Amino acid sequence: MSTRPPYTSTTNACKLCKPLGASLVFRGIEGCVPFLHGSQGCATYMRRYIISHFNEPIDIASSSLGEKHAVYGGAANLKLGLQNVTKKYAPQLIGVATTCLTETIGDDVKMIINEYEAEFHKGEGHPRIVPVSTPSYAGTHMEGFNAALQAVVEQMAEPVEPHDGVNLLPGFVSAADLRSLKELLDDFGLPFTLLPDYSETLDGEAASDYPLIPAGGTPLAAIRRMGGARLTIECGATLPDKSAGASLQQMHGTPLRRLGMPVGLRETDRLMDALVELSGREVPVRHRAARGRLIDAMVDGHKYLSGKRAVVFGEEDLVVGLTSFLAEIGIRPVLCASGGKSGRLQEAVATVLAGIPGEMPAVREDVDFFDIEEEARGLAVDLLVGHSKGYTFARKEGIPLVRVGFPIHDRLGGQRLLHLGYHGAQALFDSIVNTLIAKKQDDSEVGYTYM
């Protein structure tokens, strides 16, 4: 009989708040100000997490509700907040995400926005307002991210004539990943719309003055034309049936192709195959060369990785991509964990590991780091792969941590980590190999200075 005491609380969650994901999407749209309908503390929390990872300032507006609004509702504050943001920032778009408070008290945000627009004469000089429902008690930051994407395309994409453009919905990746994807599509000569695109708005150049709304982001005109694209490529192995890509398909007849997040050799090959088919071109020389260098590095480093055991954690789709990559370089994933609960993680992990020798790893959804630590202790783990929230466990157990994903708030440059494509796989490979070499070196009684 187990002597473990009952445990019902969450300890060091492996997920973040739903409105945070929505805020990131809105930040990746041209001229947009993210706006949280809720208490001031919600916006402060989101800003703190985003700033600690991206090392960039970010303004997130708030309707700043207090105790009385929990009784009387937040309509007046929302309308006043929209007025103030419009006057101060002159945005082209305001993305309004709800919070636990406003969802609990039952504010009808769409109705309030309709009333606001009627009162203040919506039209030229007034920003477009896109609301999205994102109560944190109903999901994670990834569900908020996907919900905001879906809201944007449903409310902004217009009926247009078919065109040669391609829509790319890569999911929640780094600013460096977004820049890399844009370069890849340019190399194939494909006109495209990337949504969202915070590659400049959350990783910009040094400026002498603080811009209220940074330059960059997916152009609004491009979003309006997404319904006429020849194809939408949506990256994610655990996405829900209802998604931004599915909405474009249903509302505008835009063909949809879903791929896994292109982490590692095989998943990147699948993306390249799709781009070859779309463009009618061969894989560009520099990407073929990068693939060849990656394979060469995998041969060189295999002796340091073969048989090592890893725990992978973070957003579900990134966990799937990392699991695929680790298996193909000789590391055995023994636990794949996420705070998300799509119900699709187990199947997605099994799919990317099909044909690779070895036992299936344990797959756990809706877990926190208490759960992850409890299970990992009996698995003889050599490596942790995930974000900074795993540091406490890594330090406690003396297991090296390779930081990937979000949030990375105890190292500099999380926004510039490259995860995707052949170049991203090369960067991850080198980081993993060198982390394991450093661990062996540090644990040696005599040390060594030559590989």
Image: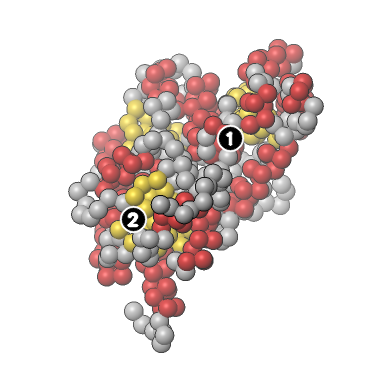
Task: Kindly report the distance in space between the C-alpha atoms of the residues bearing marks 1 and 2.
Answer: 30 Å
Specify the quadrant of the image occupied by residue 346: top left
Residue at figure coordinates x 43%, y 22% from the top left: 247
Front-most of 286 and 212? 212
Residue under pointer 2: 334
Name, please, the residue furthest toward the right. 68
Residue 294, percent from left and from top: 30, 59
Vertical relation: 444 (above or below) 368: below
Residue at position x 44%, y 46% from top?
338
Instruction: Return the mark for residue 45.
Output: none
Residue 132 in sight here: yes
Q: Nearer the viewer, residue 40 or 158?
A: 40
Q: Disc 1 marks which amino acid?
A: Ser
Horizontal side, residue 208 vs residue 363: left or right = right
Q: Position of residue 240 (x, y in %)?
A: 41, 30
**Looking at this view, is 395 or 144 the one in front?**
395
**Type of the residue with mark 2:** Val
Disc 1 secondary structure class: helix
Q: Which mark is residue 136?
A: 1
Q: Quick check: 4 above or below 277?
A: below
**Dot 2 alpha-carbon crowd within 10 angstroms: few under 14, some 14 to 19, many 20 or more:** many
User: Could you tell whether 270 is left or right of 176 in the image?
Assistant: left
- Report the residue at 34% width, 27% height from top: 256
Tell me the residue at 45%/16% (across/down). Answer: 159
Would you place residue 105 above or below residue 327 in this image?
above
